[in-house]
Image: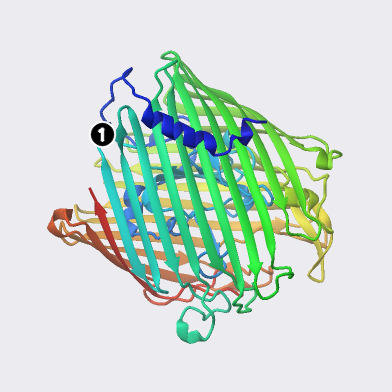
Amino acid sequence: MNFFRAKWIAPLVALGCAVLFPAASRAVEPEEEAYGLPEVVVTASRVPVSRDKVGAAVTVITAKDIEMQKSRSIQDVLRRSAYVDVTRFGSPGTQTNFSLRGGNQKHVLTLVDGVPWRRALGGDAMIPSFSVENIERIEIVRGNMSTLYGSNAMSGVINIITKRGTVKPSMDAMMEVGSWRTRRSSLGLRGSAGEARYTLSAYYENSDGYSSSGNSGNTDSSGLENDLFLTKNMSASVSYPLPFYDHDLNASVSYVNMVAGLDIFGGADTTKIFSYMDQITSSIKLSRAVTDRWDYSMMYGYYEERLENTDFGNPKGSSNLTRINHTSTIDFQNNYRVKDHTLTFGWAGEIDVGKDVKRATPYAQTIVKRSMYMQDLVDWKGWTLTLGGRTDHIMPDSGIAYLPKLVARTFRTSASRPIDEQTRFHGSFGTGFRDPTIFDLIFPGVSGNSRLKPEFSKGWDVGVEYSSPDNKFRGDVTYFKTRYNQLIVRQFATGNPTGPNLNANRAVTQGFDIEGNYDLTRRLSVGLTATFTQSNIEDTGTVVQGEFDKAADKKATATVRYAISDALDVVSVVRFIGKRWNSNTSTDKLAQATITDLIFNYRPFGGRAGEWSFRTENLFDEVNVESTGAAHQQRSHWLTYTWKK
């Protein structure tokens, strides 16, 4: 248990040791060039695999994509992918929900360099608020992934991979001003010291924001109070070949501090409610190649979040809360290769701790999880196949000792095979689960139920991908279907909770995912992602209200880039959001919308003087209400300067 309590101190010690210890045992390898090589993804199989051999549905968003679109946050990056349904309850800094393939936020697992970002109390996946300039790539894997990653990975995994150190020193800086008196800035440094490679980054954002109440609170002339937003982030990482036992060390640590003004959901404009949040994430990983066939890695990860809402107008009101979540994880993964097989197996452990300390009756709860997993990846007669299984044991502490130990068993298989030189088939079939959260089990009042069982899902997808002979065009169409069982829901009557949570609901989601990229000329390229989703909730009782989030039934994002010259290019991002169910009821739908963003990027003197960018978001001022009672974002303008060396 003491190992778990090391928190983020261990990565800090590793960072210092790697820089201070001299190293002469191995020569520094030159950085590899990836040009002309097939794209490699890691999240779909836990080992690096060429994308054209992956059976899962995978989307990769690179640092180049993020830079081209000048996204302000990870939320905006994901929002511009049609596969991720993002809904924000007003101004930046307010509650944000997201989902994949019609599931809800508890059915998605978010990873940052392999560390889960998830609230222990409620089980909600979190979107980090650190600088997008520090992101190397984002891998979005859709479908059941619990066999590889455990609880919550029922509709997919979003893996955010940050930048790593380089042999050649580099530096980048960004400054931006925009609507709502927003100021953003970031600074990044990457390099090496001896054999150690390191990164350092800092990020700052300050915005007056806009009122989250109603649907017309974006302007100062609206008469509503703006909801300010302030965030600060500092991150560091190091990789170092240890001179003993031939191990490689990778360590990282990141700290985020946020302050946001809040409005009472439902339209009330308030001036004295503020949210304060601190987030810490860290990891330390040791890896070793024992032989040409066998390698292993040991990883410790830690995530902590402290959320405090304060109502200065009513210090004893229900809006005041202090909640603390922290999750410690360890993972011991082995990879063994023999002939055409890559066998991945390991053991994982997790401790989730949640505290609610400002209630009339404060409480805290700890849940311990132990897992074993195994997967075989094999190349057989032109097929690339995976077959794996996992067992998870979920055990609460003595606070609710009468709760029986929960066991979740999942499996997954996938396949990829070329049909001809340009076309390939891919598909997957598997199961997933979500264990009951602390809120589900013991939330004070009528909601908690200590005898809940895990939610389960079973789903499959099948798709065809085509690439043109000159590699200028790539397209993919995938059909998916997932059935959810034992969904945890609350009992309601006349809008009020009347009984404890139950495993009472079933749901089915199905639809199509479409993706395409086409380089028409050297200067003109077009990209498209689209999804069509149908979700049906099957209640088993008249007094049970489902809490299955309603995603937009149709979404599409088209990105067009045209290089007017070597120094100037223009990018247009057009997002279509179809109708979605009202977040409060299932009796009416919110209107569809088409949002257009326009970006100009200018690099004078061949980029030696940096890059200037001007963008307008929501160019035609389209009304896009993502949640009833919350304001939508109107047209906004942004000026950005980026410098790299």
Q: Nearer the viewer, residue 481 or 29?
A: 29
Q: What type is the residue that disc 1 sits on?
A: Glu
In the rendered image, residue 79, in percent from the top left (x then y), is placed at 46, 59
Residue 417 visible from this viewpoint: no
Few, some or many residues within 10 Å of mark 1 (<14, 14–19, 20+): few
Quarter in which the N terminus is drawn: top right
Identify the residue at horizontal 48%, vertical 37% (top origin): 12
Identify the residue at horizontal 41%, vertical 51% (top origin): 515
Q: Nearer the viewer, residue 411 or 614?
A: 614
In the rendered image, residue 469, in percent from the top left (x then y), is placed at 26, 40
Among the 4 quarters of the image, the one containing residue 323: bottom right
Left or right: residue 368 compared with residue 634: right
The residue that mark 1 highlights is 33
Q: Nearer the viewer, residue 542 or 185?
A: 185
Is disc 1 placed on a helix, strand or loop? loop
Identify the residue at horizontal 48%, vertical 26% (top origin): 286
